[in-house]
Image (spheres, rainbow, N blue to C red):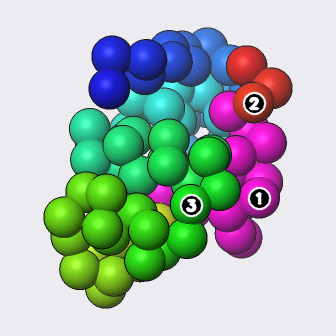
Amino acid sequence: MGRRPTHRGAGSAGGGAGSGGEVGSQLTSREWQVLELVRHELTTAEIARRLVLSQATVRSHVAAILHKLGVPDRAPAVRLFHER
């Protein structure tokens, strides 16, 4: 998982959820792993199998990612990081 992009300074000023800033630095390493698999359009079940997690745990990670990025669902989360 050495392909974690750096997103410092991207987006608008400020540091709160959904404001851009250093949002990427707020994600945990596991959240980065989950986001990478979401980016590849894996389902919750596929991510759970790949990372040896329960589906409930994957859903919790996805919810945390969405909250930290300030987006309503997976698609804008993926677009946010494709733009950088």
Amino acid type shown at disc 3: Leu
Q: What type is the residue that disc 2 sits on?
A: His
Q: Looking at the image, tell me whether mark 2 or mark 3 is earlier in sequence order.
A: 3
> Would residue 39 appear left or right of 34 to someone viewing this image?
right
Q: Are marks 1 and 3 in contact (CB under 8 Å)?
A: no
Q: In this image, 3 relative to 50: left or right? A: right
Q: Nearer the viewer, residue 84 or 40?
A: 40
Badge 3 local density, few (<14 within 10 Å), some, or many (20+)? some
Q: Nearer the viewer, residue 45 or 16?
A: 45
State which quarter of the image contains the C terminus: top right
Q: Amino acid at mark 1?
A: Ala
Residue 65 percent across, percent down from the top left: 48, 57
Residue 11 spot, x, y in % from top left: 74, 26
Q: What x and y, as percent, mark residue 82? A: 75, 30
Can you tell which quarter of the image residue 60 is in?
bottom left
Q: SS for tag 1?
A: helix
Residue with the mark numbered 2? 82
The magenta stretch spans which residues? 63-81
In the displayed structure, would residue 73 be above or below residue 11?
below
Give the CA separation, mark 2 to mark 3: 16 Å
Give x and y (percent) for residue 76. Answer: 78, 54
| Whole-number angstrom distance, CA of label 1 to CA of label 3 | 12 Å
Number of the label disc, if any, that sits on residue 75: 1
Q: Is residue 10 left or right of residue 2?
A: right
Q: CA distance from mark 1 to mark 2?
A: 11 Å
Residue 70 shows up from this direction: no
Give above or below for 12 relative to 26: above
| Mark linked to residue 42 | 3
Give the quadrant of the N terminus: top left
Residue 52 within the magenta-colored segment of the rendering? no
